[in-house]
Image (cartoon, rainbow, N blue to C red):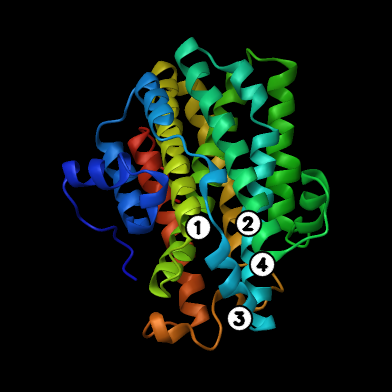
Amino acid sequence: MAVEVRQLGDDQLEERVGGAKLQAMDQVYIDDVLAYTERGLDSLPSYMDLYRRAIKQAWNPDELDFSADRREWDSLSPETKQRRVAGLRLFFDGEERVASILAPFVWAAPTKEIEAFAATQLTDEVRHTVFFERYWREVIGTSATDLGTLIDEVRPTEIPAYRQVFYDWLPGVAQRLASDPKDLDGTVEFVTLYHLVVEGALFLTGMRYLLEGARRWNRTWAFYKGFTATTRDESRHVLFGVRFLRDMVAQDPARFVPVVRGTIDRAMPLIEGHIKPAGAPISLYGGKHLEVVWPGYTPERMQKEMLEYARMILTRRLHAAGLAIAA
């Protein structure tokens, strides 16, 4: 899988990605979604443009039928099930965590236009959490009777970098904004960590390889549709983050460039800690059938490429925000 995204015209991307309905998401390639995002960096949308996209692109997880996903799950080996759960629980818990700490950012929004978009993002993150809840209950299976219990069941607490970002750093900055919504330094740190590091470098990298693998195995059923729609939402959030940081840096570079730089410097080892967690088996990056649909790939090569891709897209988005930072 080449690192560069597919090259399609703007009109093709808008039709194929921007206007796609949920049930048509099985026809959307993940690199189409990423190309849609990368193209947006060339001419960043306004906050209200992003708000209107969010309204236009809203979708409902309850419209998905997971029966084909369940039939495939029942046919999998225990090893494959374990590997799949290990990756998906990071996304499930991650979506719930970011949904749980976004409200203070809505309160801290410096303008009403930013507040309007941030409110749509909170709705998006809750939607993603509900999507994963449905998948877990109807495909993987659980005895949890409520969402809170299910989140406790899937929580990936064994990865130090994950705990530090999702249970320490992000909640800490969110609490700072809750205590003082006018803290612009805290707001810039929050957007850098949340929108560029978590959603941009971590979520979209993982989504890219997970969805590309599913497509190569012809698993373009309900999960593929919902997760591709989730990726389109996350891509919109990343464009917001780039636009916000560009505006803040232009407003006061002496104040805000050091905040962004400091956040990125602190985050870089944690990005690697997510993609290459100490002690995690390399088999998580592919089983014995990996080369069937990824010719020439080994788990080691996939892990290395994912880390390179995460760093590359983070660097490009920082550049688009007016910051030349080597990631």
Q: Is residue 196 above or below residue 215?
A: above
Q: Is residue 267 above or below residue 53?
A: below
Res 167 → quadrant: top right
Res 250 → quadrant: top left
Cα–Cα gap, marks 3 and 2: 16 Å
Q: Please report whichever mark, 2 or 1, sits nearer to the chain's N-terminal start.
A: 2
Q: Secondary structure at mark 1?
A: helix
> Of the residues shown, which amino acid type is indicated by label 3?
Ser
Q: Considering depth in this image, is 76 or 235 the residue closer to the camera?
A: 76
Residue that carries the numbered disc 3 in the rendered image: 75
Q: Please report whichever mark, 3 or 4, sits nearer to the chain's N-terminal start.
A: 3
Coordinates of residue 264 in the picture (x, y in percent): 54, 43
Q: Please report whichever mark, 4 or 2, sits nearer to the chain's N-terminal start.
A: 4
> Of the residues shown, which amino acid type is indicated by label 4?
Val
Cα–Cα gap, marks 1 and 3: 17 Å
> Of the residues shown, which amino acid type is indicated by label 1?
Ala
Q: Residue at x 68, y 65 (%)?
A: 140
Q: Secondary structure at mark 2?
A: helix
Q: Left of 269 or right of it: where is 219?
A: left
Q: Secondary structure at mark 3?
A: helix
Residue that carries the numbered disc 4 in the rendered image: 85
Residue that carries the numbered disc 1 in the rendered image: 222
Q: Please report whichever mark, 3 or 2, sits nearer to the chain's N-terminal start.
A: 3
Q: Residue at x 64, y 39 (%)?
A: 98
Residue that carries the numbered disc 2 in the rendered image: 135
Q: Residue at x 35, y 46 (%)?
A: 316
Dot in front, 3 or 4? 3
